[in-house]
Image (tube, grey):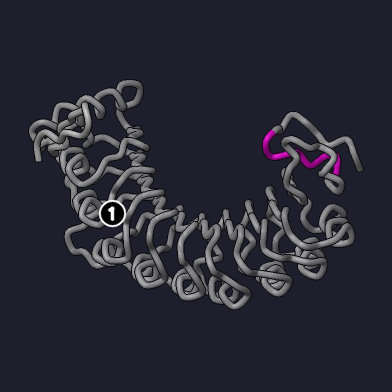
C-alpha cells in the first residue's frame, strides 16, 4: 500500500518481497546454526508463509536434525511447504507448538503422497487449532513411521483421538504421548491403553483431563504399561480411590517419575502412594504441587524420593 500517514507520523506498511526477505532469513539460519549445524532454533520469530518458503528452500538446512519453529505465525500453507521440503528430509525433531495450524493443514499432511519428513522421531503440535477431526488422521497416517514422541496437548483432542492412538498400526515406535489439557475421560483412557501401542509407552502425560477415580484405576489396572517410566496425572479430579489404586498397582512397577498433584485426594490417598510397596523404582514423586516455593507442601513424600526441580534437595519430612 506504500506510505501511510497518520497525524504527524508516517510509515511504510508495504509487504517485503521474497527477494527482500531472503537475506534476512538466510542470515537468521546462519546465526542459528553457528554453534551446531544440526540444531536450528527459530522460535518466536513471527515467521509466516514467506519466511517458511525461504527456509524450506535453503541449502543451509539440509543437515538440520532439530528444527524449532514454535510460537510463530505458521498456518496450513506454511505447514504444507515444510512437510514437502526436500531440504528438510533429514529432520528428526520438529517443534510447531503455538502456531495457527488448523485441521485442514494436518489432514492434508497426513494424506500427502509428497511428504518428505518420514524421518521425524519427535513431533510437537501442541497449542494449535486442531481437533479430533485431524488428529485421528494424523495418528493413522503412514507418513510418520519413525515417530517416537508426539505432543498434541492444549487442543481439542478427545476420546476419538485416544481411540485412534490406541488402535494405531502406523506408529510402532511411539514411546511418548503428551495429551495435556485435552478432553479425555475414563472411557478415553480405556480406548488409549487397549492396544499394542501402550505396551511400548515410556512416558505418558494426561495433565488436566477428566480422568477422575475411574480413569486412575483403569491406568493402575492396565497390564500393558510395564515399560512406563514417567506418568503425569496432575489436575484430574482424582480422589482417594484413584490414589490408592495407583499406590497399589502392580502394573506400574517400572515408574521412576510420578506427578499426581492438584487432585482431590486426602492425606489418606497421599499416604497410600507414599507408602507404596509396588512402585519401588520411583525417584521423583509429586503429590502436591508448589514444592518449588513452599517446601512444607510436600507432606507425604518419602525422604528418598527427590523433588523434580531440585534433585539435590531431599524432603526431610517423613
Name the image quarter holding residue 36.
top left
Name the image quarter holding residue 224.
bottom right
Residue 256 lies, in percent from the top left, at 69, 48
Identity of the residue drawn at 31% across and 50% down: 119
* 223 or 311: nearer the viewer: 311
Residue at image mark 1: 118
* 231 or 235: nearer the viewer: 235
Q: Secondary structure at mark 1?
A: loop
Question: What main secondary structure does the magenta stretch of the protein show?
Answer: loop
Q: Quadrant of the N terminus?
A: top left
Residue 234 lies, in percent from the top left, at 67, 56
| Left or right of 292 on screen, residue 185 | left
| Left or right of 282 on screen, residue 183 | left
Identity of the residue drawn at 28% across and 23% down: 31
Q: Is residue 60 above or below residue 84?
A: above
Q: Is residue 296 above or below residue 115?
A: above
Q: Residues within 10 Å of mark 1 (few under 14, many from 20)?
A: some
The magenta stretch is 302-309
Q: Given the current orientation, which residue lies at the most extreme right position?
A: 318
Identity of the residue drawn at 16% across and 36% down: 13
Residue 308 belongs to the span the image colors magenta: yes
Q: Given the current orientation, which residue lies at the most extreme front position?
A: 7
| Left or right of 170 on screen, residue 254 | right
Residue 24 lies, in percent from the top left, at 19, 27
* 75 or 10: nearer the viewer: 10
Residue 17 belongs to the span the image colors magenta: no
Count all numbered tags in the image, as a single digit. 1
Identity of the residue drawn at 59% across and 78% down: 187
| Left or right of 176 on screen, residue 217 | right
Residue 318 lies, in percent from the top left, at 91, 43
Amino acid at each position: 500500500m506504500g506510505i501511510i500517514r497518520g497525524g504527524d507520523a508516517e510509515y511504510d506498511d508495504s509487504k517485503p518481497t521474497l527477494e527482500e526477505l531472503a537475506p534476512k532469513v538466510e542470515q537468521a539460519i546462519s546465526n542459528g546454526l553457528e554453534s551446531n549445524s544440526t540444531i536450528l532454533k527459530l522460535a518466536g520469530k513471527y515467521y509466516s508463509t514467506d519466511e517458511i518458503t525461504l527456509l524450506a528452500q535453503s541449502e543451509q538446512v539440509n543437515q538440520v536434525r532439530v528444527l524449532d519453529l514454535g510460537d510463530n505465525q505458521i498456518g496450513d500453507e506454511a505447514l504444507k511447504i515444510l512437510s514437502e521440503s526436500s531440504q528438510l528430509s533429514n529432520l528428526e525433531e520438529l517443534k510447531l507448538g503455538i502456531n495457527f495450524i488448523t485441521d485442514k493443514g494436518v489432514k492434508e499432511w497426513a494424506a500427502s503422497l509428497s511428504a518428505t519428513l518420514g524421518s521425524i522421531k519427535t513431533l510437537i503440535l501442541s497449542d494449535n487449532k486442531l481437533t479430533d477431526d485431524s488428529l485421528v488422521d494424523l495418528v493413522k497416517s503412514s507418513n510418520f513411521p519413525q515417530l517416537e514422541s508426539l505432543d498434541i496437548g492444549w487442543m481439542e483432542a478427545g476420546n476419538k483421538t485416544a481411540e485412534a492412538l490406541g488402535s494405531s498400526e502406523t506408529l510402532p515406535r511411539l514411546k511418548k504421548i503428551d495429551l495435556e489439557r485435552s478432553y479425555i475421560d475414563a472411557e478415553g483412557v480405556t480406548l488409549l491403553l487397549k492396544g499394542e501401542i501402550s505396551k511400548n509407552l515410556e512416558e505418558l502425560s494426561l495433565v488436566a483431563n477428566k480422568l477422575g477415580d475411574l480413569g486412575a484405576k483403569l491406568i493402575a489396572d492396565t497390564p500393558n504399561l510395564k515399560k512406563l517410566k514417567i506418568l503425569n496425572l496432575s489436575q484430574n479430579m482424582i480422589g482417594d480411590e484413584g490414589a490408592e489404586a495407583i499406590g497399589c498397582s502392580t502394573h506400574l512397577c517400572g515408574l521412576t517419575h510420578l506427578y499426581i498433584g492438584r487432585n482431590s485426594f486426602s492425606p489418606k490417598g497421599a499416604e497410600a502412594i507414599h507408602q507404596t510397596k509396588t512402585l519401588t523404582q520411583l525417584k521423583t514423586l509429586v503429590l502436591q504441587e508448589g514444592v518449588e516455593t513452599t517446601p512444607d507442601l510436600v507432606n507425604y513424600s518419602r525422604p528418598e524420593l527427590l523433588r523434580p526441580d531440585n534433585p539435590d534437595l531431599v524432603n526431610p519430612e517423613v
